Image (cartoon, grey):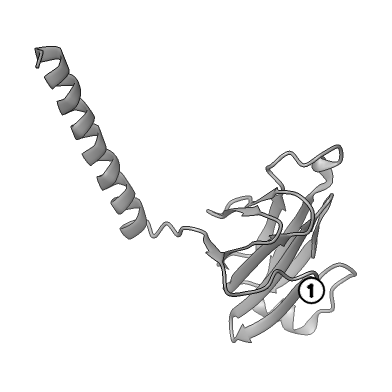
Amino acid sequence: MDKSEKLALNVSGLLLVVFLVAIVYASVAKEVDVPTCITDMEPFATDTLFQTGPDSYELQMVARMWAFQPGNITLPAGSTVDLYLTSQDIIHGFKITGKNLNLMAVPGAINYMSVTFEEPGVYDFACHEFCGAAHHTMAGKFTIVEEEAFEGETFGEGSL
């Protein structure tokens, strides 16, 4: 074996170790969560949001050409949302600005990830997978309000 071949193999092996250590560090120290595909649940056709605990919610979201349903969601600060996402037509993407959440909405499949909204504010979400002529309209927002404001306020149409 030539010296340059040995060098290339050694550098490749070292890079593999570095990448493996980086992946383990991201998952353990930085608590990076990986999306999960749910296989024991039938894809749903309608959107649903319900409270599952004091600060936890389950959101079943449907992506359709060219909108997410629901499009606007209002929740109290400190909420953890178990997000289940599916599509009824073609592949769509789903990304929440300011959060480490990025999912694919695939017809016939359900993808899952949990997200916590600690701070009040508006967290926009949008489709990041080109899905046709009106792709730019596939957007919505999570409006996170203080707990006190959430309990006594009624929210407009399109909010849950």
Horizontal side of 106 relative to 71 (left or right) equals left
Q: Quadrant of residue 44?
A: bottom right
Residue 71 location (% of width, % of height): 80, 61
Outermost right residue = 157
Say if 139 sits above or below 73 in the image.
above
Q: Quadrant of residue 13?
A: top left
Horizontal side of 38 relative to 19 (left or right) equals right
Q: Residue at x 67, y 55 (%)?
A: 105
Say if 52 sits above or below 42 in the image.
below
Horizontal side of 128 relative to 22 (left or right) equals right
Q: Nearer the viewer, residue 1 or 64?
A: 1
Q: Residue at x 66, y 78 (%)?
A: 147
Residue 158 location (% of width, % of height): 86, 67
Name the kind of residue labelled 1 in the image. Leu
Secondary structure of residue under mark 1: loop
Say if 88 sits above or below 84 in the image.
above
Q: Residue at x 81, y 41 (%)?
A: 136
Q: How many marks?
A: 1
Q: Residue at x 53, y 53 (%)?
A: 100
What quarter of the picture does the N terminus occupy?
Answer: top left
Q: Nearer the viewer, residue 93 or 42?
A: 42
Residue 120 location (% of width, % of height): 64, 65
